[in-house]
Image (cartoon, helix red, strand yellow):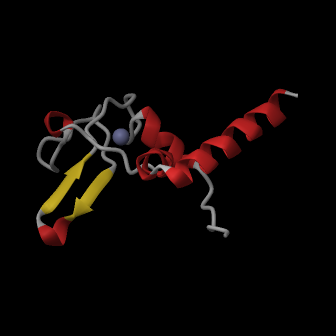
Amino acid sequence: MHGSVLIMKFTNAITTAKAKPELLAKLTGEIQIPEEQRRTILTLTGTTCRWPFGDPARGEFYFCGGASEIGQPYCEHHSKIANQPAQSRRR
Ligand SMILES: [Zn+2]
C-alpha cells in the first residue's frame, strides 16, 4: 500500500519537474551549492561531501562541501544519487 503511494508521489514529482527545470535539477542532483559551502580539492575534509560540480577544464570546478557522515564520501543527498542504479532515460 505505502509503496504504491510513494510511486505515485514520485511520478507526480517527475511530471512537475518536467515543467520546472529547477525541480528537475534537484531530482537529478544538479543542486545549487551556496558559494560559502563549496570546496576545492584542497579544502575537502573527511566529513565534507566530495560530489563534483562544474568542469575543471573551464576552471569552474568545486565539490558540494555538504556535511557527510564519517567514512562516507558524499552528503545524504548525494549518497542517495550515488547509490541509485543507473537509469536510462525513456521518453
Ligand atoms: Zn553533496
Judge left or right: residue 70 versus residue 4. Answer: left
Percent from the top left, x then y, of residue 41? 16, 50
Name the residue at 61% across, 42% down: 13
- Residue 82 seen by the camera: no
Residue at image point 30% right, 54% down? 52
Q: Quadrant of residue 57?
A: bottom left
Q: Nearer the viewer, residue 88 or 47?
A: 88
Q: Residue furthest right?
A: 1
Picture layout, residue 22 above or below residue 91: above
Image coordinates of residue 56 in percent, x first then y, are: 18, 66
Residue at 15% in and 39% down: 35
Q: How many numbered dots are placed on residues in this image? A: 0
Q: Is residue 28 above or below residue 77?
A: below
Nearer the observer, 80 or 33 = 33
> Which percent across, then down, holds residue 88?
63, 68
75 vs 17: above or below: above
Q: Position of residue 77 (x, y in %)?
A: 45, 37
The quadrant of the rendered image in which ligand 1 is seen is: top left
**Residue 77 shows in this picture:** yes
Q: Quadrant of residue 89?
A: bottom right
Task: Quarter of the image for the N terminus: give it.
Answer: top right
Specify whether 44 is left or right of 70. Answer: left
